[in-house]
Image (cartoon, rainbow, N blue to C red):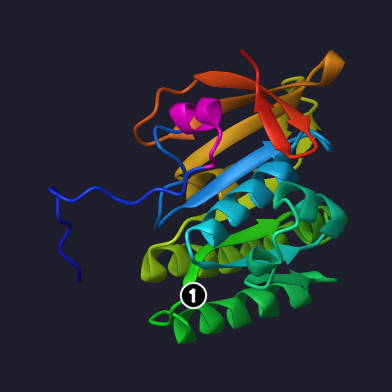
Amino acid sequence: MEKIKLNESEYKTMSGYPCIDKLMEGGLEPGIITEFYGEGGAGKSNLAMIYSISALKNGNSAIYIDSEGFSVERFRSIANGDMELINHMNIYRVKSLDDQYLALIKSDKLIGEKRESKNSFGIMVVDSFTNFFRMEAGKDASARMEGYEKQLNILSGIALKYKIPVVITNQIYEDVNNSTLEPFGGFFIDHAMKAIYRIEKFSGGMRRITVEKHRSIREGSYTGFRIVDSGIECEV
């Protein structure tokens, strides 16, 4: 049991971009899972990299679990080629659901082992969390739901135990019954999230990030940005 201290402010991981940090009222919260969801190419991975780099700049290490194809070139571009930062970025490519599960278990152990060290971990990212679940969409639904629950429990435990933000990215599917675009995984993933942001892209390179679910920020709040070589650029 841990007593919650109401007179202490939680340290949030900032993006470094005023429009995003203002929307998130300071940045990513520690101790919870935050979800970025949207169509392919909307900017989810860019944001995941930006927050990873922010943690690295604060003297922490980062774990990045990749299931879709991490762009080393894009990461270096956002990090401005800073090799000192890159040295503390732990990137792991997973190739199946079982591989992803083992990566989460190993990440939990690694974060715990480095908890008291100089470069302790300040963030964990899974990009994308649902990629292999989507590939198995036609298989046993109950087994898939069990898989969601098992992996999300590990991530929730990591966020809570080590008081760091955990970020997952997710893609969308069309709900034919309601003619809407929804994040993959539905209720099982939505229920585990304390913060959900939808990323959309529009013609002309414009992007929008909208608060879909949050414990303290007004849902429906949004801001615009563009993806540029060095990261993103706030849309004024």
Above or below for 215 versus 181:
below
Point out the stretch of residues depicted in magenta: 15-23
| Residue 79 on image: x %, y % | 70, 53
Residue 2 falls left or right of residue 107 = left
Residue annotated with mark 1: 119
Residue 157 falls left or right of residue 148 = left
| Residue 184 on image: x %, y % | 72, 43
Above or below for 123 versus 13:
below
Q: Quadrant of residue 148?
A: bottom right
Could you tell me what secondary structure mostly forms the magenta stretch?
A: helix
Q: Is residue 109 visible?
A: yes
State the residue at coordinates (51%, 19%): 220
Above or below for 31 versus 37:
below
Residue 148 falls left or right of residue 4 = right
Secondary structure at badge 1 equals loop
Residue type at numbered disc 1: Asn
In depth, the one of 42 and 71 nearer the eye is 71
In depth, the one of 37 and 88 nearer the eye is 88
Membership of 22 in magenta stretch: yes
| Residue 154 on image: x %, y % | 53, 70
* Quarter of the N terminus within the rendering: bottom left
